[in-house]
Amino acid sequence: MKSLLARGSELASSKEQFRILAEVSEKKSLPSFADKLKEAGLYPLRPTGVDILQVNVGKLCNQTCKHCHVDAGPDRKESMTKETMQDCLVALASPGITTLDITGGAPEMNPNFRWFVEEASKLGKKIMIRCNLTILLAGDKYRDLHEFFAEHKVEVVSSLPYFQKRRTDSQRGEGVFDRSIEALKKLNSVGYGIPGSGLVLNLVYNPAGAFLPGGQSTLENDFKKELRDVHGVQFNSLFALTNMPISRFLEFLLDTGNLEEYLEKLVTFFNPVAAAGVMCRNTLSVGWDGSLYDCDFNQMLDMKLEGKVTRISEFNQAVLDSREILLEQHCYGCTAGAGSSCGGSIA
């Protein structure tokens, strides 16, 4: 693996990432993800329908997290235009779609973010925001975001790697834990996470190293007790997500020499029950430029949809429901153990 490690800081292209995962799989005699699905009777993998429209409105972010599969950060320029957002709204009006899941980067940094939320709320669909919490403290432009979210009854989903300062800061940056707690208190102040308020606040846990997350319910109980007792913070649910062996986390695995062991672990703990419920079966991912993907991870690897419908401006529910989902070795990350999706564990 030395030759790969030497290139760990240069992982820029999806082709290079595919090559690295394929080389490790061949060396360890690991089956392809497609072959594993064939054994489970799930190949070819097809959608159950488009229920969730997940829209990445840009890669600009006020943080640079070590595990970020988007490679988001303050230096990124990609940003969805208002025109493309309008195309998303047209698709969102389809009766089969119930949920708009807005992500980034920090989606709130897109100049048309508030307009997008306001227009989507008029359609009566559920709206989710993937919020990194610290954006709520990033200056006057964002200081009323918690009130804006509450006004439009947006479900807030926020990453908090752990309920202790050291582990959170090591993954997301110095001082992030304290700022995250302050932001959570702002959300609590308008009702988020408070029983009976109707305002949903969910947290996301990602392991800090090359291992699978523990049991989601146990983690949720630990998070709730610690955050309530120590910080006076409340939230609704915890989503435990497996780190995908792509982008920055792939670099981490290469730099620490853990890639072979981690990929082998994902394959060993393949769960056919989780595979049957992967998020790509009921979710359609939209890139900042309007391109369509089976999921957010495929989006970051530039695995665009193939066929008649490849952009959100061409949205056709029937065509999309009949497509074959594109697969690669990174897909093992969603099917190991209890499984992993944007809504947490699957099985």
Image (cartoon, rainbow, N blue to C red):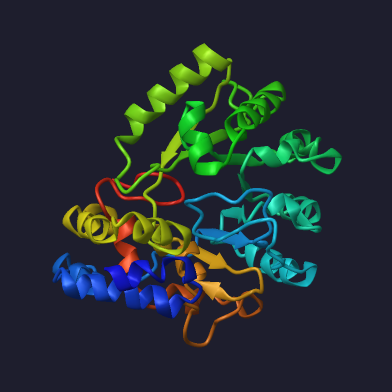
Quadrant of the snapshot with the N terminus: bottom left
Q: Nearer the viewer, residue 255 or 179?
A: 255
x then y, percent, for residue 89: 70, 64
Q: Nearer the viewer, residue 6 or 148?
A: 6
Quadrant of the snapshot with the C terminus: top left
x then y, percent, for residue 332: 29, 61
- Residue at (62, 80) in percent of width and height: 314
Q: Is residue 298 above or below residue 240?
A: below
**Residue lying furthest top:** 229
> In this rendering, would 143 be left or right of 307?
right
x then y, percent, for residue 315: 60, 76
- Residue at (45, 76) in percent of width and height: 14
Q: Nearer the viewer, residue 120 or 268?
A: 268
> In this rendering, would 231 be left or right of 274?
right
> In this rendering, would 117 be left or right of 312?
right
**Residue lying furthest right:** 140
x then y, percent, for residue 143: 80, 36
**Which image quadrant for residue 36?**
bottom left
